[in-house]
Amino acid sequence: MATTDPTTKTHPVDVDYALDLLSEGEMEEAHGLMPWSSNYTFLVTVCHDDLEALAIYKPSRGERPLWDFPDGTLALREVAAFHVSRALSWDFIPPTVLREGFLGTGAVQLFVEADPEEHYFTLRDEHVPVFQRLAAFDYIINNADRKGGHCLKGKDGHIWTIDHGLTFHQEHKLRTVIWDFAGQPIPDDILEDLDHLRQTLNQPSSPLASELRLLINDRETKMFRHRLDRIIAAGTFPQPGAGRNVPYPPI
């Protein structure tokens, strides 16, 4: 698969091809649980025809109950975040699908081989355009858990982001380590992408609108649109509000 400059918006993988593989391929026995995960997170192999790829499988039944997110919905939110990222042509979430696995329905995401020594705090100075987009993205999806370790540098140099289960809550939940741009004007190209996303959502028959209806509830969709309208109108990156604004641990 071709590599790309991490500051561009060109997909470093063939997304449609990867989605077909993840959706249609046979999921082989897990290689094991991923370390340091609070929910069941398995490394698996997905095979289709003569091809195979490593993937991350997060079954809904393995999610730890939370007081503020409905049970069994985190996998759905992972997939919803991918669809929004793709609709924006912001290619920092690996291809992700919702499908059946050996522990039932869950999110299955293409595994990214990354440098374990790199994270947001080591990458931010060299990848400002990527993280500006990510700051806007986390606001509109209401990401409650953007840790520095959720930002990865692939072996091809591309910047990826993972772990989007705590998103799309109807109440304000934004907790992130990416406050570097708070209050600054949003670049025009990002605002143009956000406005295009809004136009897409205003078409009820669009693939994105159809997918979101299956993944998040009506109230969450309404508030997602509200945040999108709000950031476009403001034209600036969000600032921390009252209360807890940074996840723990930060990495």
Image (spheres, grey):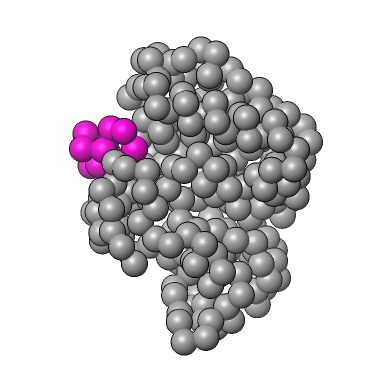
Give the answer, above or below, for where 12 lies relative to 164. Answer: below
Mainly helix, strand or loop, the magenta region?
A: helix
Q: Is residue 26 left or right of residue 133?
A: right
Q: Position of residue 181 (x, y in %)?
A: 35, 22
Q: Which residue is nearer to you in this view: 187 or 184?
A: 187
Q: Position of residue 83 (x, y in %)?
A: 58, 48
| x 42%, y 28%: residue | 190
| x 28%, y 53%: residue | 4
Instruction: Identify the residue at the far right of this view.
Output: 218
Indicate the quadrant containing the C terminus: top left, top right, bottom left or bottom right.
top left
Is 128 magenta? The answer is: yes
Give the answer, above or below, for where 186 lies relative to 33. Answer: above
Q: Which residue is nearer to you in this view: 34 or 233?
A: 233
Is 178 magenta? The answer is: no
Please identify the quarter of the rendering in which residue 171 is found.
top right
Q: Is residue 251 visible?
A: no
Q: Position of residue 12 (x, y in %)?
A: 35, 56
Instruction: Identify the residue at the far bottom of this view.
Output: 50
What's drawn in magenta, residue-wise?
A: 119-130
Q: Is residue 107 left or right of residue 5?
A: right
Give the answer, above or below, for where 74 lies relative to 218. Answer: below
Q: Is residue 53 visible?
A: yes
Q: Position of residue 205 (x, y in %)?
A: 74, 43
